[in-house]
């Protein structure tokens, strides 16, 4: 009896120890990212006091101060010689650059592992302010605070928490990390574009760029995380398939061009990934609030992103691939499309081309990224408005001479729609 009793007790102890072990293991992986910390960042960045973080506005400066304080706590370095995390850039306001402009700031913090390559981890921290920036979906947006909890306090929380993870995990990775928070995204990727034109490190040493834009609304049922840019390097698709788990299901899109900051890096021939939990009815409305965020879901998304980074750490610098891109911003009202990504931030007269879609009319005719379209058929193109109007006037199958400026020369291409 006694022996049996002892044996049973021993067995129970063994089970208890095993159970404790399993629990601690699952807790350590699930709690790699702290839900309370993520909630804390988003509650502050999306609070009414930040006034919707309009580009260059007082509320956005408050958000920038908060992000810098977090970077400082994590002992990230300045990646510039101006003894600051800030990179100032000029911007023009309004939906098409017609509004009042000013100066805004990107925020860059560097984790130096003395490696030869650097991974950029980014998210935009600006949003629509008080609804006067032109892209609110509210019927009467003026004077309403657009808090932007998912868009994109969620991504900024991701940058800060990945910075914490990578700087406190006691592993010296074989890459350095540049944590970047962009402004001017909502005005047309203005901040990220400025960064890639005025980089604070040699872009040829950048391994890849990870962009988090709207990662706070992981669906509780489907758990689908959209990952865009998977065609920009051969490693992405097989790796992401492998990392899918019971908390996060992955849906990929190959294109390196999309409506967020990774596009600026893709256009500099860098592999990119954009993580996105999907659009929703509060998108670009004053109701995108902190209490609608799925915090556990965001922690799961960050765990997956951290695993992407750590599982590639021993690999050599990633190979870059160009991707077939979907036409951007096509409106059903147009009978024809060119397949170009228009620049929303260029001040050149005409329409500056920020990207061309392979296999579409503009690219087939010979138009390239950087060209400025100044005439289509008989129509002079002075700005994006003229360009949109012109697209409404041509028919499918029609061939039209398109004049562009390229490096001081005026060239004419025959575009067949
Ligand atoms: Zn947005």
Image: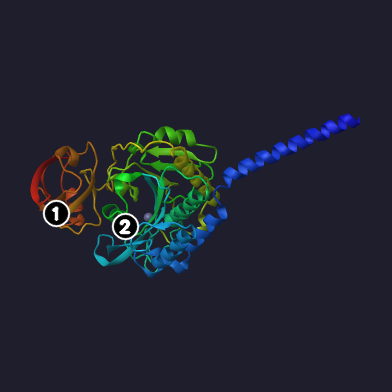
Q: Position of residue 25 (x, y in %)?
A: 62, 41
Q: CA distance from mark 2 to mark 1?
A: 26 Å
Mark number displayed over residue 381: 1
The residue under the point 21% across, 38% down is 360
Q: Nearer the viewer, residue 127 or 12?
A: 12
Please report whichever mark, 2 or 1, sits nearer to the chain's N-terminal start: 2
**For the C terminus, which image quadrant?**
top left
The residue under the point 40% across, 64% down is 53
Q: Position of residue 100 (x, y in %)?
A: 27, 68
Q: Nearer the viewer, residue 33 or 147?
A: 33
Mark 1 lies within 8 Å of ligand 1 (Cβ measured)? no
Q: At numbered mark 2, what does the secondary structure look like: helix, strand or loop?
A: helix
Q: Is residue 89 left or right of residue 167?
A: left
Mark number displayed over residue 234: none
Q: Residues within 10 Å of mark 1 (few under 14, many from 20)?
A: many
Q: At numbered mark 1, what does the secondary structure look like: helix, strand or loop?
A: loop
Q: Where 413 falls versus 282 (above or below)?
A: above
Q: State the residue position of label 2.
A: 191
Q: Is residue 46 visible?
A: no
Q: Is residue 68 left or right of residue 90?
A: right
Residue 116 falls in image quadrant: top left
Q: Residue furthest front?
A: 114
For ligand 1, the image quadrant comes to bottom left
Q: Position of residue 236 (x, y in %)?
A: 39, 36
Residue 368 falls in image quadrant: top left
């Amino acid at each position: 009896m006694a022996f049996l009793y002892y044996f049973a007790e021993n067995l129970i102890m063994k089970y208890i120890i095993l159970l404790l072990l399993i629990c601690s293991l699952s807790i350590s992986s699930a709690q790699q990212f702290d839900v309370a910390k993520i909630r804390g960042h988003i509650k502050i960045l999306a609070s009414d006091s930040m006034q919707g973080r309009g580009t260059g506005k007082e509320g956005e400066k408050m958000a920038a101060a908060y992000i810098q304080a977090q970077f400082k706590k994590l002992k990230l370095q300045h990646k510039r010689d101006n003894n600051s995390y800030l990179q100032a850039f000029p911007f023009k306001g309004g939906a098409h650059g017609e509004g009042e402009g000013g100066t805004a700031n990107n925020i860059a913090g560097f984790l130096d592992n003395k490696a030869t390559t650097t991974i950029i981890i980014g998210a935009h921290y600006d949003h629509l302010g008080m609804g006067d920036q032109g892209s609110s979906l509210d019927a009467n947006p003026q004077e309403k605070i657009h808090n932007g909890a998912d868009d994109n306090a969620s991504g900024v929380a991701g940058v800060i928490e990945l910075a914490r993870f990578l700087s406190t995990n006691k592993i010296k990775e074989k890459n350095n990390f540049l944590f970047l928070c962009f402004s001017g995204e909502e005005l047309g990727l203005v901040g990220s574009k400025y960064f890639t034109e005025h980089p604070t490190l040699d872009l040829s040493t950048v391994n890849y760029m990870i962009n988090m834009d709207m990662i706070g609304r992981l669906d509780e049922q489907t758990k689908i995380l959209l990952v865009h840019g998977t065609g920009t390097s051969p490693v992405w698709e097989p790796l992401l398939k492998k990392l899918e788990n019971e908390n996060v299901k992955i849906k990929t899109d190959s294109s390196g061009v999309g409506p967020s900051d990774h596009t600026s890096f893709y256009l500099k021939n860098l592999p990119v990934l954009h993580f996105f939990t999907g659009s929703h009815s509060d998108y670009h409305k004053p109701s995108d609030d902190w209490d609608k965020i799925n915090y556990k879901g965001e922690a799961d998304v960050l765990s997956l992103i951290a695993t992407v980074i750590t599982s590639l750490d021993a690999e050599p610098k990633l190979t870059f691939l160009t991707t077939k891109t979907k036409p951007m911003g096509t409106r059903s009202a147009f009978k024809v499309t060119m397949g170009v990504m228009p620049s929303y931030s260029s001040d050149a007269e005409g329409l500056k081309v920020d990207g061309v879609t392979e296999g579409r009319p503009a690219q087939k005719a010979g138009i390239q990224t950087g060209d400025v379209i100044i005439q289509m058929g008989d129509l002079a193109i002075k700005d994006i408005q003229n360009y949109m109007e012109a697209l409404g006037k041509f028919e499918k199958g029609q061939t039209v001479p398109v004049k562009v400026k390229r490096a001081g020369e005026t060239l004419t291409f025959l575009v067949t729609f």
